[in-house]
Amino acid sequence: MGNNSVKQAKISVAQFHKLCEERLPFAHEMGLELLEIKDGTVLMRANYSEKYLRPGGTVSGPVMMALADAAMYALVLSRIGPVELAVTTNLSINFLRKPLPGDILAEARMLKLGKRLAVGEVSLYSDDKSGTLPRDNPVAHVTATYSIPPQSA
């Protein structure tokens, strides 16, 4: 077996999309799309729409916050399974630079997963269509905490 500390994801991309379609339709309406769950991280996209621009031609903060929150939710579910009542208890965002008017990518990773709380971070990037994340040029950085409901007996 190898010494791999990353466990198999407990929810697939397809399962997450189905959950969103059935229980969180606003995620699809906002153009949020889970791209992958891999190596203990989640990659998600906010598909570009001119309606998400704010004055000055930049993607609005609420869209970036929604993307980061959705990416964190997908990450938590990838680690604990489809526990719909896991909820955000804190989200802090630092806007680092003006994003390009285009798709925004979010890469989420877990910092600590306990029985009742999950703490993670999300880096947001303008999609430069290169096929790789421009990790040296994030547009925002987010830390988030999720409350995990107790398991029923």
Image: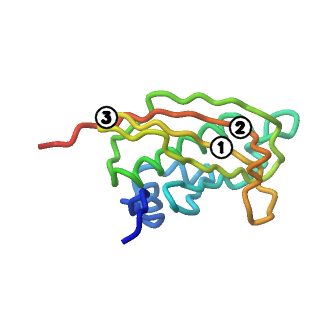
Q: Residue 143, image x and y in percent? A: 56, 33
Q: Earlier in the sequence, mark 3 or mark 1?
A: 3
Viewed as shown, does residue 123 lie left or right of 145? right
Q: Earlier in the sequence, mark 2 or mark 3?
A: 3
Instruction: Please tell me the numbered disc located at residue 123.
Output: 1
Q: Quadrant of the N terminus?
A: bottom left
Tag 2: Cα neighbours inside 10 Å, few (<14), some, or many (≥20)? many
The residue that appears at 35% across and 46% down in the rendered structure is 84
Name which quarter of the figure residue 12 lies in.
Answer: bottom left
Image marks 2 and 3: residues in contact by CB distance under 8 Å:
no
Q: How is the image coloured?
A: rainbow
Q: Residue 14, image x and y in percent? A: 45, 67
Image marks 1 and 2: residues in contact by CB distance under 8 Å:
yes
Q: Residue 17, image x and y in percent? A: 47, 61
Q: Amino acid at mark 2?
A: Ala
Q: Amino acid at mark 3?
A: Arg
